[in-house]
Image: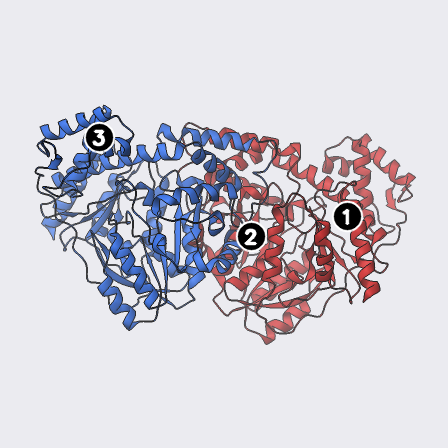
Chain colours: A blue, B red
Amino acid sequence: MNRYEQLANILGGRIEQGLYPVGQRLPSVRMLSSEHGVSVSTVQQAYRVLEDRLLVEARPKSGYFVSASKPQAALPAVCRTPQRPVDISQWEPVLALINSRINPAVIVFGGGTPDISPASLKPLTRALARMAQRQDLSTLGYDSIDGSKILRDQIARLMIDSGSHMGAENLVITTGCHEALSIAIRSVCQVGDIVAVDSPSFHGAMQTLKGFGMKALEIPTDPVTGISLEALEMALEQWPIKAIQLTPNCNNPLGYNMPDDRKRALLRLAQAYDIAIIEDDVYGDLAYQYPRPRTITSFDDDGRVLLCSSFSKTLAPGLRIGWIAPGRYRDRAIHMKYIGTGATATLPQLAIADFIRQGDYLIHLRRMRYQYQQNLCLITDWVREYFPAGVRVSRPQGGFMLWVELDEKMDTQRLNRLLEPENIHIAMGSIFSASGKYRNCLRLNYAQLDSQIHKPAIKRMGELIHQLMANS
Amino acid sequence: MNRYEQLANILGGRIEQGLYPVGQRLPSVRMLSSEHGVSVSTVQQAYRVLEDRLLVEARPKSGYFVSASKPQAALPAVCRTPQRPVDISQWEPVLALINSRINPAVIVFGGGTPDISPASLKPLTRALARMAQRQDLSTLGYDSIDGSKILRDQIARLMIDSGSHMGAENLVITTGCHEALSIAIRSVCQVGDIVAVDSPSFHGAMQTLKGFGMKALEIPTDPVTGISLEALEMALEQWPIKAIQLTPNCNNPLGYNMPDDRKRALLRLAQAYDIAIIEDDVYGDLAYQYPRPRTITSFDDDGRVLLCSSFSKTLAPGLRIGWIAPGRYRDRAIHMKYIGTGATATLPQLAIADFIRQGDYLIHLRRMRYQYQQNLCLITDWVREYFPAGVRVSRPQGGFMLWVELDEKMDTQRLNRLLEPENIHIAMGSIFSASGKYRNCLRLNYAQLDSQIHKPAIKRMGELIHQLMANS
């Protein structure tokens, strides 16, 4: 595919996903040229393709506008949640999901792995090999408790794109975002404490709450604007909530970016009730928009936000390198880091720092954003083609996860049982709820799509859903 | 140094450390030849050197016997401990110890790092480099939650030497022994629970108890036979203890190997009171005796022992690869693993598995045991030469840590303050006690000794101790 065709697909995808509504002026040729690192004429060619597809119309001296779009699938509904803190369930299905990671015969739509095959990761594996054989053996000793300064410097630099201006001394390197979340939770909460979470919410973070003995209070969450501030405020009035845990950018599983004004309003709420915010930004660098959305952390002026992230989604999960910016909770976070893993592995930190410094991280990110956006169009089309009419799908603004809501009579646990012998794996909606809601939903990972493999799998999924619907 | 001189030093060291008391028959030439992988004539030459040193006498047709030894330094005293559970203190000095890891100008006697410079580690760094560039990218994806089977198989094989016969399915790979301990503690205890610990005890494990809100009950511990079973039984009678946490082999900091009959008796106590044992074996493979001592785990027949270990002391801490054999607590341990770090980094697991499979691990171990045993003789001599008369020192049977007990009026915190401007770093005794005991003790790491650097440093330390004594 040519560069201009790729770009046309991306812009077309954005229009179809509703990022640019009908009648809106589209980004200028010059802006797109800078965003995507392509020539002005490539952008012009891309716009011509979109004109041919009747998605875009050119208005003389004004630029390009969204002319029409095919009707979109309905968005998932905002769900009522239990209006009280609950003990978190769902460990068994989460464990089943984790165990599905490693069977190569299975078509895995359920997992959280990004595409780790692109050539743009090669400089990273070369850096790993080079660092491993360094004569000074610096990769074999204990690292400092907060991680290699050389990597923290690079991360601090990258964080400027999300609106944060902090120094390396504000960061602690962790063994993936899992350890960051684990540190964050233990830094601000005790056993029995109540934590408010977006709903649906990342199952790993909720299992962490469960493992440390906290209760979750699920807050209804809009598939476009994020956690309901109104519902959150009511909950804060009613319950002694200790922290809010959420993923405001490229949300997992819903894919939205929370608007900046709502991020600010959320922070004001946290200030008013004097509670902490645990912000998971692990997909943030994979936002399709340019520049990437800001973090809540970037608005934080009193250190109450604990930012958790990693390179597991942007680079590769097997490296197990993440970080936390623990704000005012740094001392406690360092203690939690020490008792959790002692220190972080040195070699991958040095290799990643080198990869970023050489500019290879941004090149890789650009490539992956292209790919994930293109794949989003593909999988959305397949789902709409093969799943029953009335299916609701999310409109991800980044990352590589699609949330699908089926008829409310559907139970994806039953679907999962039918899919197992077909070697197709999904993430059941219920694991994204502390109380086992979202039984009629599923999450599909579209990081790596092959039309020969994944399209027939979605088709088969659709057949089984039809079959279950007919029998119910 | 020739092979026979090295061997003579090792045997001489064992004799001086009291491993072979006066009059005892020494191992046969054939046995030593097999233990050390040297020829029979090398062993005979070594024995001749020891005869010249008047340490050994040959008796015709009977073999070699310990003829005499110079008077040994007294052993550290068994300490009275607070006879009640306490909240664990000492985080600040532990943090100071951790932060001393990374200043290359400092002569570090305080840290826990092994010697990572030997050529016998080269095959490991080569394996890391080779695996990093594998075309199948298997090192970049999420590993299974319990770690790479290929590594678990190798560890299970190695564990036969400690008397354990378990399969790979009984092991979970962790991010160092720290994560193993963290998982173990959270698998058997709740906030507020009481855990009995050996005293002095590894500060990292105690800080883990502290971080998770448990209390420590320190049990008096003999510097040769380990934790007092009599005191432990009294404590079990009196307090609702949930678990015993200890390091029975190559104890950190005391260096003893608990005799097998006491390991069995400890297990019987745990069974009688139905509590768990958390066994830290991280130095076990570095025991100077051959074959290495058995673990408590190897006697366990009802899965109540959680064995924690890692390659941080035997290979290199920067790899962050450890393991836990969680026995009957496996389900809970898997949940704790998931919420702590999600998975363990893949690349170092595959490289270490390769290193073991090629036989390089055993070669490296043999080399390090030689070196650490030789260094033990050196540092013991230096301490006895330069420290005030009456100094008591441990007689380590493995590992690379010497425990030094000074006059009871001494405060090693004051010593530490004087050492800081001299760029010499020690581990103060107080961090090895939940209640801040052992203020007159210190721990010295002798993994890597250079007579030009470390001997003058010990000499200077001795001068400062004399000076403090004179002023007190």
Chain bearing mark 3: A
Separation (CA) of disc 1 from disc 3? 66 Å
Question: Which residue is disc 2 drawn over?
Answer: B308
Name the residue at 50% across, 28% down: B130
Q: What residue type is labelled 3?
A: Leu
Residue A259 rendering spot, x and y as whole percentages: 24, 52
Q: Nearer the viewer, mark 1 or mark 2?
A: 1
Label 3–label 2 contact, CB within 8 A: no
Q: Marks 3 and 2, how far apart in space? A: 53 Å
Is residue A38 rendered to the left or right of residue A440?
Answer: right
Judge whether residue A311 can be spotted in this image. no
The residue that appears at 40% across and 60% down in the rendered structure is: A302
**Badge 3 and badge 2 in a common chain:** no
Residue B9 is labelled as none
Residue B457, numbered circle: 1
The chain ID associated with circle 1 is B
